[in-house]
Amino acid sequence: MEIIKETLERGNTIIVCDTNVYLHVYSYSPNYSKYALSCLNVIKDYLYMPTVIEIEYKKHYKSCFKQMSKRILDSKDTFIRQIAKAQSDSLSINISLKKLGFDEIEELNKSLDQYYTDMIKSVDEFFDDREQVMTLLANSWEGVDYVFEIYRYIVEQKHVFPALSPIELYRLCEEGEKRYNNKLPPGYKDDKGKKNGLNKYSDFIWWKEVIRYAKKNKCDVFLVTNDIKEDWWSKDDKGNSILRAELVSEFEKTGQKLYGFTSESFYELIGKQYNISVPDMFEYALNLTDDDYCKRISDKVFDTIVDQLIYNGMYYIDKDSAHLGLIGIDEFEIVAYSYNYGTQEKRDGNNIYYILVYDVVLSGYSYDYWGRDDETKNIITSPGDYHEFKGYISVSLKREANILVDFENEDSFEVQTIIDGCFEESLYEPWDESDEMEFIEGYTTCPKCGNKINYHNDAGDGFCLDCKE
């Protein structure tokens, strides 16, 4: 759809923007938000709003507006966290070198500590000298919520769709459940067990609102959404995103035409046809919502590296300070963990790389080698010594962000792995030698063969190794 301006001026076309289109404007850089607002204002006479989108916007706009200045004013703290991370990373490397006997590394540590101190001082001075500039950026809207002004205009023009009755909403929720079960667009990708009622079926309900309005008023629709999931979009032969064929087919039953856009493509066309200059920098909500994104995915990311910690935890243990047996610890338990912080490491085209840091407590039993059983040839080990270790791990991950992400719920990531970690022994409880006879002679009997079960032949399921289920 290349000629938006001419189509709108013919008078039989309306524009419907998803809630995320309005809310994303709060998350852009000052330059891009000004550009987006200019585009929305020049076509505001054609903006119409389904009642569900009005409800969602009114629910979130105040907190989004409040967060605008906070993201800029907090940039100093973000910068300092990056320095602290670099310092932590270098300390981990230095510990590894010290383990290898390179004691001179302490001299380097002292030198680096001074560099990091100087860096933090430089950051403090830089932001202190530019306090007025930061304040101006943080208050670039001068306390006026320009997105809300557009919403107010839509209301004043009576461009909010007629409200649905409770009976209509109930019937739509019933229909939405059937469609979601059959993966019929739109909205079924939002059904993650976390939403109920109106929230669960909101995409489907406002979609039906648009169809009803277009049919009754005989108008075409420009539909703009930043929800890029497969329940709205598919790919054509050239790899371009297009609205799902099912949506287009369903809408065309009204006798009208439907055109789909993301806000990025829509603003680009509006800017060209209405001569609105495009800013040099396109900084999307992605950059400005990194902290929220990292917190949101932190538990899911940790779940993906649990096995790495359980079976490869010895790699991160400071063995010089621990009382480990010769065999070490084969399998750890995670006693506790907490998300510390996350940071964007780098950007490579459409891929954004993050590092998430966790504080973790591990526990496990280490054993000494006592030889082999003469008959079975099985390895004989000592009883286990109990250990606990406190430390941290750093986890890397990749996020694809070629188009604006879902404002509230996007939590995709991939290529997650532990890239660093360091644990020191915090508790050591050696086995009690008074238990040695029980260890050797046995502490129970195998119900299948009748032999004594001890630490040598315990299969862990109530049977001895020879009779294990």
Image (spheres, rainbow, N blue to C red):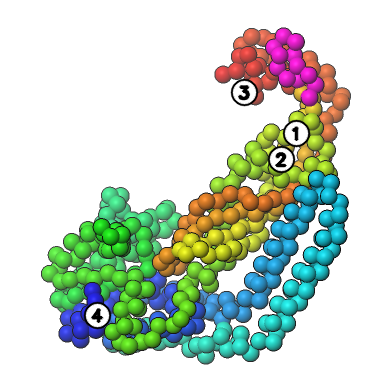
Pinpoint residue 162: horizontal percent, then vertical percent: 26, 76
Q: Are marks 1 and 2 in contact (CB under 8 Å)?
A: yes
Q: Secondary structure at mark 2?
A: helix
Residue 49 in the figure: left or right of residue 308: left
Q: Amino acid at mark 4?
A: Ile
Q: Which residue is mark 4?
A: 4
Q: Is residue 379 magenta?
A: yes
CB within 8 Å, label 1 to label 3: no
Q: Are there few (<14), some (14-19), or many (20+) residues within 10 Å of tag 2? A: some
Q: Secondary structure at mark 4?
A: helix
User: Which sits earlier in the primary sequence, circle 4 or circle 2?
Assistant: 4
Residue nearer the viewer, 166 or 254: 254
How far is disc 1 from disc 2 in space, using C-alphas?
8 Å
The residue closer to the viewer here, 355 or 291, is 355
Span shown in magenta: 369-380
Q: Which residue is mark 1?
A: 328
Q: Residue at x 71, y 45 (%)?
A: 316
Residue 327 versus residue 395 in the image, above or below: above
**Image vertical order of residue 190 relative to residue 285, above or below:** above
Other-residue count near label 1 (Cα within 10 Å), few / some / many at <14 / 14–19 / ≥20: some
Q: Secondary structure at mark 1?
A: loop
Residue beneath disc 2? 314
Element under label 3? loop
Whether residue 303 is visible, yes or no, is no
Mark 4–mark 2 distance (CA, rounded to whole Å):
62 Å
- The type of residue carrying mark 2 is Met
Query: Mark 3 sits on what residue?
Result: 461
The tag earlier along the polypeptide, 3 or 4, is 4
Q: Nearer the viewer, residue 220 or 336?
A: 220
Which quadrant of the figure contains the N terminus?
bottom left
Give me the C-alpha separation between circle 3 and circle 4.
Answer: 71 Å
Q: Amino acid at mark 1?
A: Gly
